[in-house]
Amino acid sequence: MPSTDVDHSSLPTTAPPAAPAPRGRRANPWLTLLAVAFGLFMVQLDASVVAIANPEIGRSLHASTADLQWVTNSYLLALAASLILGGKLGDRFGRRTFYLVGVAGFVVASVAIGLSGSITGVIAFRAVQGFFGGLLMPNTLGLLRSAFPPRKFGMAVGIWAMVSAVSTALGPIVGGLLVEHVSWESVFFINAPIGIVALAVSAAVLPLSRNATDRHRFDVAGVVLLAAGLLAVVFGVVKGETWGWTSAGTLGSIVGGLLVLAVFGRYETRVEHPLLPMRLFRVRALTVGTIITALNFFVLLGVIFFVMLYLQNVRGLTPVEAGVRTLPLSLASLVASPLGAALTQRFGARGTMPAGMVLQAASMFGMLAWDTGSPYATMWPPFVALGLGVGMVLAASSDAIVGQAPVRDGGVAGGLQATALQIGGALGTSVLISLISGRVGATLAGELTAAGVPDRMADGLGEARDAVAMGVAPVSDGMSGQLRAAVVEGSGQAFMNGVHTALTVTGTLCVLGAVLAAVGLRGTGPARH
């Protein structure tokens, strides 16, 4: 793993007493990896299949657009507020215990969503699902950090990253199949068999893993401050597109949340046993890795969101057909994560992380060639580059964050990474939708007129920019065939204008991320053992 100059003045000078060495299958770190992979796959798959199910949920439960936003937002808010807490609880009271509690709670909440029968129930149980996901996710990395020796941890993280990336990318395919051929409820019910297998395997093979010396008072004030700050920031982010990014509500929520987080950071430097030790951020690789993790999922989740809109609403593909078109992304992710881990182990995160961000930048700029009728030959190369880039960065940043943290803080470091990942994903979706919507609003009337729609009608259809920003043309049954074709053409072009703006911004951020990783990780190198 990369070596970094660290101020060890506030780190423990002696290692905590080791727990009795496990024997048999509980001593096998690869079985630990197998066990946590089931829970990780379940949570990451759920995150992306829900996006496919949302339209059918709306039709079935007569939900408004605002209701459907809360199906996602309630989950994100609960998850963001509980990730670092889940890691800390695992470090102190047992990573195996809280991983199992997280899996069991996630499964029960998933089944409850499918049985709820109302949009209110779906939203409420999605929040419960997010809370238990917050207990589960950070302890997957905490368990790996304590189970694997340093020389093998990088490869374990590569496989962890592969499972995460592939399950996220497979979501549209699995979700499309379930929604088309079973029901929207099935996208939640599928978590039950996966979770049951995860519980059975985990109970059989996971070793006990906790910090034997942690008998101090729990940092309740830190929990409250961190949860409040993260809730406010994420709430402002997810509502920014609806309220407007410069509105008082959005700015008040985000700025207020950042102020609370600043108070939290100050408080954590003064408390004897902090929830999130600020000394971790003295490790430059960990700090840079956290930022790049957020950017990595900003790109992945934001791009997947508008790519699915493009394939389904602009190109007219079914959910399954759209999911199959993105298969190169999944396959590239499958290769990229272990490759990224091997490269990180050999050359250090400073080599792998910038290379992954450059691949993502190439993907974004390659997508600028897309239009409303692009052949598939122009689509799959950017998908491959994106999958390779995301997988490589995820493996390198996981090593930089969790691999550079002390073993005793493995769960907290895992929670930090998972929090960055979720906030980055929320920002990606919200910010890119806002960019697309803004560009659509500025160009829709002009594109409709250029396509042959009369000026007066084009001005009137400009009010439908929200639908066009989702790739939907505002046509009606009363329009002639020629007029419908003109509206579809103009709307599609306006949508692509928005997509090109989002891609330009995202590609630029990827370039900046590559520079940050190269400069910020200066002085680090491959692991020395």
Image: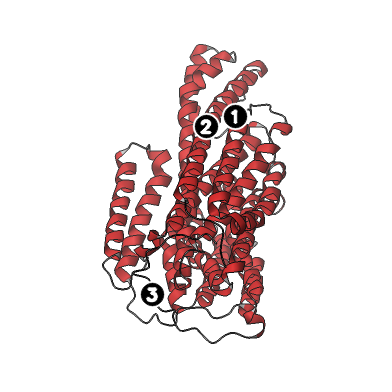
* Residue 280 seen by the camera: yes
The residue at the point 54 percent across, 34 percent down is: 503
Whether 404 is drawn above or below 426: the answer is: below
Disc 1 vs disc 2: Cβ atoms closer than 8 Å?
A: yes
Q: The N terminus lies in which quarter of the figure?
A: bottom right
Number of numbered tags placed on the structure image: 3
Residue type of the residue flagged with mark 1: Leu
To which residue does mark 1 refer?
Answer: 368
In three-dimensional space, the C-alpha distance between marks 1 and 3, rounded to whole angstroms, equals 51 Å
Q: Residues within 10 Å of mark 3 (few under 14, many from 20)?
A: few
If you read the primary sequence from the N terminus, does the residue marked by circle 2 or circle 3 appear first?
3
Q: Could you say where residue 149 lies in the image, as x and y percent from the top left?
A: 58, 72
Disc 2 vs disc 3: Cβ atoms closer than 8 Å?
A: no
Residue type of the residue flagged with mark 3: Pro
* Numbered mark located on residue 108 in the image: none
The residue at the point 67 percent across, 18 percent down is: 481
Disc 1 vs disc 3: Cβ atoms closer than 8 Å?
A: no
Q: Could you say where residue 106 lies in the image, as x and y percent from the top left?
A: 54, 66
Q: The C terminus lies in which quarter of the figure?
A: bottom right
Q: Could you say where residue 226 lies in the image, as x and y percent from the top left?
A: 35, 61
To which residue does mark 2 refer?
Answer: 504
Q: Nearer the viewer, mark 1 or mark 3?
A: 3
Whether 405 is drawn above or below 319: the answer is: below
To which residue does mark 3 refer?
Answer: 12
The residue at the point 55 percent across, 67 percent down is: 140
Q: Residues within 10 Å of mark 2 (few under 14, many from 20)?
A: some
* Residue 453 seen by the camera: no
